[in-house]
Amino acid sequence: MMNIKRSALLIGATGLIGAHLKEEILQNSDYETLTILVRRHIPEEHPKLTEVTADFTHLSSYKQFFQVDDLYICLGTTKKKAGSNENFRKVDYDYVVEAARLAMECGVKRIAVVSAIGADANSKFFYNQVKGEMEKAVAEIGIPSTYLFRPSLLLGDRKEFRLGEKAGEVLGKAINPLLRGKLQKYQSIHGKEVAKAMVKFLKNGREGVHVVESDLIAKIGRL
């Protein structure tokens, strides 16, 4: 049987998970091409890689690049960096949902989206609420195979230093051994493990909407 190569689009290739995901896809023999939409140039060349510098406030202008087999979305910011709730929602909800909508219009069959542990549209916490609303909106778009990943506190070297997250990383490593059973999904997880799991889940691409909690992400990402 002929092995049909796949094409992928990655949005959010400069973040912790996205950077690892870019390398995972480039190294994966199942993929023939990878296009990344970025806000600033990444100094990297690879025969599979096409970089498109984009204005995320006008994603529809880049619709032609959504004509791929698989879409990976790793967009996310912090309220502090965004500067306001409105700007935070723009990145973590508006851009993500718009990208999924464009993918659906272009016939994308599989989508993997990074959300967050605790995502809940009914949450009293703004961050969790926005993530939950994003998941609901993406799920309703109807892409045949939709995966929503909810990693816990992320470990790994970021390009930008975030004091709060660095402190959380140290604490997370200390308490990980205590989080067992139902609490295991709250263990901190390395960004590379999340990236590996996303590629593995999308390779199978079961139909339907699938929410993948952090403990399962870790289990699959470490295989």
Image (tube, rainbow, N blue to C red):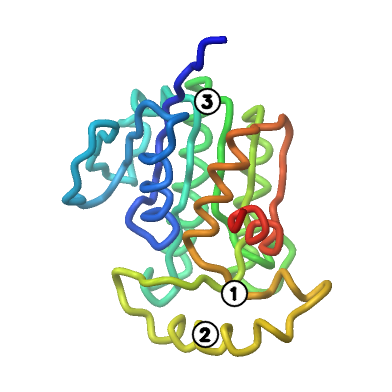
Say which residue appears at 63% left-offset and 67% top-offset: 128
Q: Is residue 7 above or below residue 51?
A: above
- Seen from this angle, which residue lies furthest right? 181
Residue type beneath disc 1: Ser
**Residues marked 1 and 3 touching at CB (< 8 Å):** no
Sequence-wise, the earlier of marks 1 and 3 is 3
**Residues marked 2 and 1 touching at CB (< 8 Å):** yes
Q: Quadrant of the N terminus?
A: top right
Residue type beneath disc 2: Gly
Quarter of the figure with residue 177: bottom right
Dot 1: within a 10 Å radius of its alpha carbon, few (fewer than 14), some, or many (20 or more) residues? Answer: many
The residue pinned by badge 3 equals 108
Q: Which secondary structure lies at badge 2?
A: helix
Q: Which secondary structure lies at badge 1?
A: loop
Mark 2 or mark 3, whichever is nearer to me = 2
Q: Is residue 159 left or right of residue 181?
A: left
Sequence-wise, the earlier of marks 2 and 3 is 3
Say which residue appears at 54% left-offset and 53% top-offset: 114
- Mark seen at residue 188: 1
- Mark seen at residue 132: none
Residue 202 position in % (x across, y down): 59, 37
Q: Is residue 34 above or below residue 41?
A: above
- Mark seen at residue 168: 2
